[in-house]
Image (cartoon, rainbow, N blue to C red):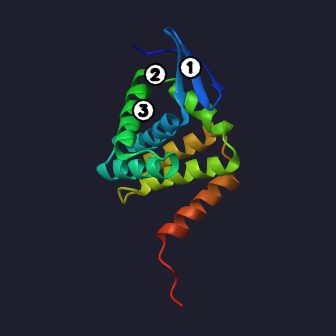
Amino acid sequence: MTDRNLQHSFSGGQVVLETADGPVSYDSKLLIAATLIFIAKGSGRIEPQESGVMLELLREYCGATGAEGLDLLTQAITELAERPTLQAALATFARSLPDPGKEDLAYMALRVIAADGRREAAEMAQFRAAVEAAGIHPEIVHRAFDRFFAETMPDPPE
């Protein structure tokens, strides 16, 4: 079933979607997984390297075990497919984060984009759309890029 014109709200660390079948709650771990899936699917498919990075990020930022991370990603794929308006809930969730959380989310998205060694225009467009929808200030995005490049660029020769 595809839900249309859903209402959503942020309550107690969760996003609640009011669907035709009643309210559906999503916790922050699932919302982070769904955000990463949304970014990874920007190129049309999720590459194996991207899956590995998403699992690593869910472990680092959410404390998810390998099995829990895989379950979160699988559930996120299903929910995004069945409830297209979940994207609006993701934006609501991201807008509710403090600036350091927004920076972490942008940084995680950059790591997923770079995971397969290619920076595709479609993924960067997806990143820009996600950042705009989440209301992440350009300065915060800049800090996320700085973190990413500091981690991935070789040290300059002395």
For image coordinates 31% across by 48% down, the residue present is: 47
- Callout 1 touching callout 2 (CB < 8 Å): yes
- The tag earlier along the polypeptide, 3 or 1, is 1
Q: Nearer the viewer, mark 1 or mark 2?
A: 1
- The tag earlier along the polypeptide, 3 or 2, is 3
The amino acid sitting under disc 3 is Ala
Residue at the outermost left position: 48
Tell me the CA gap for discs 3 and 2: 10 Å
Tell me the CA gap for discs 1 and 2: 10 Å
Q: Which residue is mark 2?
A: 83
Residue 76 tag number: 3
Q: Is residue 4 above or below residue 60?
A: above
The amino acid sitting under disc 2 is Arg
Q: Which residue is mark 1?
A: 17
Residue nearer the viewer, 101 or 12: 12
For image coordinates 48% across by 47% down, the residue present is: 63
Image coordinates of residue 108 in percent, x first then y, are: 51, 51
Could you tell me how many numbered marks the image carries?
A: 3
The amino acid sitting under disc 1 is Leu
- The tag earlier along the polypeptide, 1 or 2, is 1
Task: Using residue 34 as the reference point, say whether residue 135 is left or right of it.
Answer: right
Quarter the N terminus occupies: top left
Does dot 1 land on a helix, a strand or a loop?
strand
Tell me the CA gap for discs 3 and 1: 14 Å
Q: Nearer the viewer, mark 3 or mark 2?
A: 3
> Quick one: label 3, few (<14), some, or many (20+) residues within 10 Å?
many
- Quarter of image, res 122: top left
